Amino acid sequence: MKPDLTFRALVPVALAVFAVLSGTAGAQSAASAPTTAAPAPDYTPTRADVERDLAAWRESGLEAQWAGDETPDINSPVYISDYRKYQSTVHGSGMSQPASQSQTEPQRRW
């Protein structure tokens, strides 16, 4: 057989092997992916929770940073400082937690 024909015969086989192997690798990485910071599906914040969160967002200075058309530099020291201030206000204010979370577990709502 000519080398050109051998190569043409092996290409579909190689593609099939690649497709099979990449499919299982993708399934493994999806299974080990970390969970998101989304709230629990049974969590419904009260109006007061949302108002306290918005007030903390504004007081920390994050609202002003997100006010323009451009996305702020989330790696800048100013943004990091403002975000930490926001987090400490939100997590330190005693906002109600979902019933499924105990008081000892860290909050993962944001």
Image (cartoon, rainbow, N blue to C red):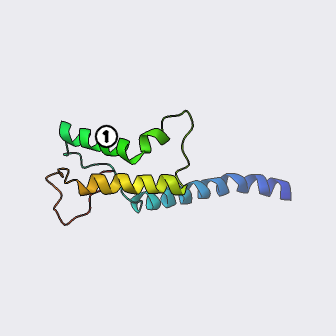
Closer to the camera, 109 or 51?
A: 51
**Residue named by callout 1:** 54
Residue 64, placed above or below residue 16:
above
Q: Is residue 69 above or below residue 95?
A: above
- Image point (42%, 40%), residue name: 63
Residue at 20% from the left image edge and 50% from the top image edge = 95
**Residue at (19, 45) in percent of width and height:** 42
Most foreground residue, 28 or 55: 55
- Residue 2 visible (yes or no): no
Label 1 SS: helix
Tell me residue 40's x, y (percent): 24, 49
Q: Residues within 10 Å of mark 1 (few under 14, many from 20)?
A: some
Q: Nearer the viewer, residue 14 or 74?
A: 74
Give the x, y percent position of residue 33: 42, 59
Please identify the quadrant where the N terminus is shown: bottom right
* Side of 83 relative to 3 (left or right): left
Q: Residue 30 at x, y = what percent?
A: 43, 57
Which amino acid lies under the numbered mark 1 shown in the image of this protein? Leu
Q: What residue do we see at 16% from left, 61% from top?
A: 102
